[in-house]
Structure formats: C-alpha cells, structure tokens
Amino acid sequence: MPRQPCLTVLIGLTVLLGSSTHVLARSQGKPMTIPLWPSGVPDDNGLSGKEKAGGCIGNISKPSLTIYLPEKDRATGAAVVVTPGGGYGVVCMETEGKQIADILLPHGIAAIVVKYRLPNGHHLIPANDARRAIRTVRHNATTWNIDPRRVGVWGFSAGGHLASTVSTVFDAGKPAASDPVERQSSRPNFSILFYPVITMAAGVTHGGSRHNLLGASPNDSLVKRYSNETRVTRQTPPTFMLHCADDRAVPVENSLRYYRQLVAHNVRCQLLLFESGSHGPGAFRKNPSWLPAFEAWLKTRGAL
C-alpha cells in the first residue's frame, strides 16, 4: 500500500479542549542573545541607526539569535528556529518569538528566535539570515545539546513566508568555506507554518509583505520566485500548518496552495483549518485543540 502523504486535515474546529564559532547558551529561563554574523553582515540592507523597540521591532540592520535551551534532563535534542512575523516591516519578537519559546521549552525542545534583517528593497537578505540561523544551530549542536538532524523552522505570517522560503530553497553547505558555519546545511528537517504568507500573487498574498519584500512594482519573475508554492519539491521537509478560514490579513488560500503542492510532491504534511480565530496568535490561542495535534506530529518527526 502506498504511504499516505498527508496525515490529517481538520476543518471547522473551534474550541474542543480547554565572534566565536561556538557559543555557550544559558539554560531555560535565561536566554542568551548573540549576533547572527559575528564578523559583520555580508550584505547591506541600507538601514542604519537605532532599532525601533517594542514587542515588534523595526529598522533592523543587525540581526541576532536569542537562544532558549531546555533543562538538560528534559531536552529531547530537537531544536526549532523561530521566524516571527511582522509583514517584513517589523519582527514581532514577543508574541511570535519569546512566547513560542515558552511553548517549546516544556516539551524539551530548544528554541532559537531570529531577529532577522528587514529587506528594505533587498529581497535576498531575510532568507540569507534565516539560512544562517539554521547553519548556526547545526554548527553549535554539540555545545547546545542539539541533534543536527532534528533542526526545524517555525514561521508566522510573513515569518511563515520566510520559513517556507528556506524550506524550498536550501543547500547542503559549502565544504570549502573559510567560515565553518557556512559549511553546514541550511535545509530544515521539518517545517511549521502558522497563518503563513506563501504566494506573492496579487489578490491572494498579503499586500504589505509583498510590498516590503519585493517593492511597489515587482516584475513577474520576482513574484514567481517568492511564490513558494511554486518551489515545492520532493525534498521539501515534512510540514505542519495552521490557518483560520476567517483570516482577512492573509487569506487561507495561501496555506491551501502550499498544502496542495506538498500533497502533489508526496511530502509528509498536516494542515489544521479552523473556522475562526482570524490572524495572529489568536488563531491558535482560540483553538486549543491544535496543541495535542501538534504534539502528536512532533512525535512522528522524532522531536518529542
């Protein structure tokens, strides 16, 4: 019997259940923040000056990683690189960063939250930062008590677009690179996408994300390049997705397009569709049945 490519689709659910290359990070509750590029960024996004502080951070030109490690007696060895949303105009490090680490840590999973640079007309830069984050986790795997074969990515909204970008366009590393971090693979072992922007197609995408990433009038080639449903292959990692039918910011069609391509390419996947919850963290906070489904999926990935 052929293997079923997709585990489950749940539709209409509401509320059912209540500069060094190695860096020593601290344990649970005491995160450590390190520069993503200790020797300086390799490309310039044209932003300068102070960041715009807050729960969502703007004007980011110096990317960093905030590392949350579980207690050693609880650690499973799995890690998730978290890419918060913010429409490629800000990065929401609190609600879609720290609070996501609070979900992962009790499960024994390390969380590495990426404060990635904003594109500001330089479309390559956010994905360069996200790939660098994945490589950095693998490079520090021994130090951080992480299995380099169990490194996933979890993205939200525009951060979901970023996570799906690195899940569809990746490399095995550059063995001859002078920087040892760059020798590591940038392919996630699994991918988690919550209410993600997927396509850049007009009328379906999130307009702000498209404008901030690609500019006011992107050509057709650039739109296709960042419409990640067109980039799915059999090598795309297993994927868990969540979206709400009443999402007016990022239409659910984004997740459906990606899901269909995962099915078509026989990629293991699970999609949770909820009747209501809108966009943002309310999508999963108002639908708590997502968590046991998520935990079960993580077990199938060997993360729990």
Image: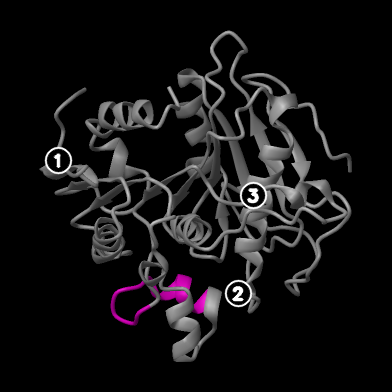
Residue annotated with mark 1: 1
Residue annotated with mark 3: 185
- The stretch drawn in magenta includes residue 71: no
Q: Do the residues labelled 1 and 3 touch (CB within 8 Å)?
A: no
The residue tagged with tag 2: helix, strand or loop? loop
Mark 3 or mark 2, which is nearer to you?
Answer: 3
Within-10-Å neighbours for mark 1: few <14, some 14–19, many 20+: few
Q: Is residue 84 rendered to the left or right of residue 12?
A: right
What is the basis of the colouring in this image? one colour
Q: Which circle marks residue 123 in the picture? A: 2
| Quarter location, residue 301 | top left
Mark 2 vs 1, N-terminal side: 1
Q: Are marks 2 and 1 in contact (CB under 8 Å)?
A: no
Mark-to-mark CA distance, 3 and 2? 21 Å
Q: Nearer the viewer, residue 41 or 297?
A: 297
The residue tagged with tag 1: helix, strand or loop? loop
Rendered position, 184 above or below 251: above
Q: Where is residue 120 in the image (x, y as percent from the top left)?
A: 64, 74
Mark 2 or mark 1, which is nearer to you?
Answer: 1
Q: Which of 170 and 165 is in front in this view?
A: 170
Residue range in magenta is 201-212
Within-10-Å neighbours for mark 3: few <14, some 14–19, many 20+: many
Q: Which residue is drawn at 45% across and 82% down?
A: 223
- State the quadrant of the N terminus: top left
Q: Which amino acid does label 3 sit on?
A: Ser
Q: Where is residue 230 in the image (x, y as percent from the top left)?
A: 37, 72
Q: Which of 90 and 177 is in front in this view?
A: 177
Rendered position, 213 above or below 169: below
Q: Position of residue 155 (x, y in %)?
A: 46, 50
Mark 3 vs 2, N-terminal side: 2
